[in-house]
Image: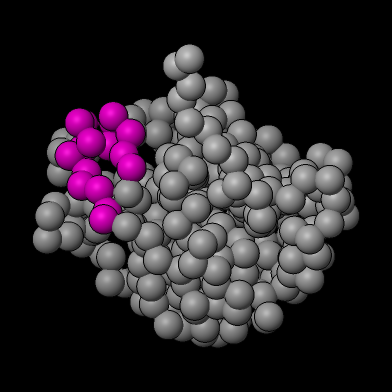
Amino acid sequence: MNLHRAAVVSWAITPCPDLDTFLEHMTRLVREAHASGADLVVMPECIDLERLNYAPANLPAAEMAAWLAQDLAVVERHIRQLSQAYQLTLVGGTHLVMAEAGPQNHALIALHGRPYRQPKVTLTQFESVEWAIQPGNGVRPIPTDPPLGVAVCYDIEFPACAETLTEAGCLAVAVPAFTETVRGFQRVRWCAQARATERQVFVLHASLVGSLNREPVPTTYGRSAILTPSVLPFPETATLAETPLNQEAIAVADLDWEALLAARESDDVRNWHDRRKGDYRLLTD
């Protein structure tokens, strides 16, 4: 098993006059994560919205996805190049793309330069109604060693998503996220922690912070963390590392696969093995 040190990035939306500045922002954060020894880096959802800083004035919301997607090939190539240059797996945040069905929200991933995508499957009301974003049709493991799952923000709030990925062999699930409020952040974090416990896997939650001071990013609230099952030998907080609240920062921790697998075989509760043993029929008598 090769992946062993993970970095989760809290990316702060900052003034950005052009595409090159956005790409340099990404490069700086990847370089910093790599310097910490990380071979897996997870960035948040919707980092591409930073580029709206230099969008045409009064660009209608309905046209933002198409405008951002114009430079998708350049952005995706840059993610591949960073992954190749630093020999790491990079979950390079999510980006709006123009798919055959319409605009979609895709996590752009590179494994030592090899590109993969994971679309967001379950959409918020803003995405589906205001932006007419189209849902993806499923999830697939990224062929790292061991396999890595990616669940984009809202997707982690549904047990079936993590179930599908972990039954396919994923021992870690990356969660690129963008939450505007305390309640939104809590929903994602609490569900990420629940998925870590019920599936006995690591969950890597990366939060967008900063603001455009207008729609579609009027505010943000979040912090990034590397989460574990709530069992020995992991910390009582079930958190290996965490960034400060609402600040650009990187949290780094080693992922001990052997300890994770051993935890499934020990202690009083064994969620992984007991996951299908309960008979929860609705009793009416």
Q: Can residue 4 be seen at all in this image of the molecule?
A: yes
Residue 175 lies, with reference to residue 172, above or below; the image says above
Residue shown at 79% from the left, 71% from the top: 258
Give the residue furthest to the top.
285
Q: Quadrant of the N terminus?
A: bottom right
Residue at 80% in and 65% down? 262
Residue 129's image quarter? top left
126 falls in the magenta region = yes
Quadrant of residue 214 in the image? top left
Along the viewing direction, whichever of 40 and 69 lies nearer the viewer:
40
Residue located 45% across and 57% down the image: 164
**Horizontal placement of 232 versus 54: left or right?**
right
| Magenta-colored segment: predominant secondary structure | loop
Between residues 150 and 279, which one lies in front from this camera angle?
279
State whether residue 213 is above or below residue 151.
Answer: above
Left or right for 100, reference 56: left
Report the residue at 85% width, 50% height from top.
Answer: 267
Q: Is residue 283 left or right of residue 228?
A: left
Residue 31 seen from this side: no
Give whichever of 266, 226 is nearer the camera. Answer: 266
The percent coordinates of residue 226 (x first, y second) are 69, 52
Query: Across the whole image, how many numbered discs are drawn on residues?
Result: 0
Q: Which residues are magenta?
A: 122-137
Locate residue 170, reporting x and y percent: 56, 66
- The location of residue 166, given as percent across then percent down, is 54, 60
